[in-house]
Image (cartoon, rainbow, N blue to C red):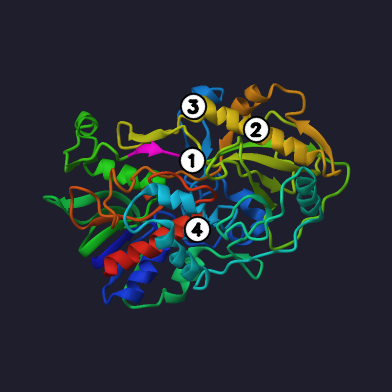
Amino acid sequence: MDADYIVVGAGSAGSVVARRLLDRTDGTVLLLEAGGRDTNPAIHDPLRMHELWDSPQDWGLRTVPQPDAADRRLHLPRGKVLGGSHALNAMIHVRGNPTDYDDWAVPGWSWADVEPVFDRLESGPLRILRDPVVDPVQEAILSGAQDAGLPYNPDYNSGDQLGVSRMQFTIADGVRHTTARAYLHPVLDDRRLTVVTDAEVRRLVFDGDRCVGVEWIGDSGVRVSRAGAEVVLSAGAIGSPVLLLRSGVGPADELRAQGLDVVADLPGVGRNLQDHWLVPVVYGSEREIDHLRGLPHSQTHLFWNSKPGLRAPDLQPLHFSVPLYQEDMSGPEHGFSLMAGLIRPQSTGSVTLATGGRPVIDPRVLSEPSDVDALVAAVELCQEVGRRTGWGEELYPAHADVREYVRRTVVTYHHQSSTCALGSVLDHELRVHGVRGLRVADASVMPSIVSGNTNSPTIMIAEKAAELIAG
């Protein structure tokens, strides 16, 4: 089963790359997805996304114990299904801050370069829900934030993020609108496209310094598929560096220590792992809280600064219409949560290989004290907003030591990125340094993480990738 182009991963990026290669070239495309079809009803109902974590549609990844987060192993939900992590996430559409892209300082990737791509994808196959009617408790949160001195921002994707807003969503007619649904499903019968699910790619195949195909495991065992033109890795910020490392592309000394032949010595592969982080501020309520169908429990958010003088917001608290209790927490059935969010972290980590090729994921969360300072500021901002809603009693952190509470409760915002970065690993056209016939197109290519949810920037990266491949 060969093709002109082989795309690894049918998630937020891979579904877009595959579709756009059909649109922009005359070539054949083989799309390999380790998970199954997107048939689970919980994928499509925005209110049921919590059912998908640690389900068959989740890789169920865990970090190594994090010494600066109470030695916990954090769950990193990652999609293992057609649609990838876009089938598991909260569907929040955020472009990021213009300074994110300008600070990358990579030719072709400034804000002026990427803004037109966002404009196109928002008016193309992907459906964006703007200015939704939200739950009554969310209206109270919007009012509470404004009472606390934050302006209302009707469009945080306008280039000015500051303020409190209704979220924009990748939702169409009350149903989650993944890139698989938007880009891929309409062309599944195209004779130039072959989509294989339950097909886990184990490594890349090289002829000298040229990537000529992939080795994968499917129902009929181990197979090798060859690419006449290029292979595109869209396996995500964990999967893409792991495949490069298994295939001999990465830090030479570490690869040799694993008994792997070195194809290209690239020390940046798997380094610079970045993520966003959340800490729960939880309120219990005696009042029953109504939930609107067709929206997730998170419906509003805000962007703000943890301290004066920042070029762009570093905080993005998310507001949920349910109390998000962790394992050692308890409280009433009804309530709401203001998730204090850090979106410009200074801590960075790594993805490496254990014996046998398994990923070792160490984000080194909160290893930089400034990240704790920022999250403390985010928690205190959420407390200020929460007490002004009139909808419940603060249960957590309440009277706890906030710094200790941050370390004990911090969780991922599901935004791993930057492990195959433009510059250190890739050239400005997403080609892997030192090899031919191989590109990466997913969140791993970000030199630094964007200020906001990473899904839509990943879709933008995929759109640009297809443009670059097609010339």
Type of the residue with mark 4: Ser
Quarter containing the C terminus: bottom left
Question: Which residue matches tag 1?
Answer: 275
State left or right for residue 331 relative to residue 52. Answer: right
* Mark 1, secondary structure of its residue: loop
- Whole-angstrom CA distance, mark 1 to mark 3, is 13 Å
Distance of mark 1 from mark 4, alpha carbons? Answer: 15 Å
Residue 110 rendering spot, x and y as whole percentages:
40, 56
The answer to whether one can see residue 325 in this image is no
Lower position in the chain sequence, tag 3 or tag 4 = 3
Q: Which residue type carries mark 1?
A: Asp
Which of the two marks, 1 or 3, is nearer to us in this view? 3
Identify residue for label 3.
368
Dot 4 and dot 2 residues touching (CB under 8 Å): no
Residue furthest toward the front? 309
Instruction: Give the alpha-carbon distance from disc 3 to disc 4, as whole Å.
Output: 27 Å
Q: Which amino acid type is marked by label 3?
A: Glu
Q: Do the residues bearing badges 1 and 2 touch, measured as CB atoms within 8 Å?
A: no
Q: What quarter of the picture does the N terminus occupy?
A: bottom left
Looking at the image, residue 320 lies above or below residue 232: above
Residue drawn where x is 23% and y is 62% of the image: 230
User: Horizontal and vertical percent for residue 119?
Assistant: 49, 68
Looking at this view, name the residue that lies furthest to the left: 208
Point out the tag, 2 or 3, that comes first from the N-terminus.
3
Residue designated by label 2: 377
> From the viewer's perspective, is the residue at label 3 or at label 4 nearer?
3
Residue beneath label 4, please?
Answer: 456
Specify the amino acid type for callout 2: Ala
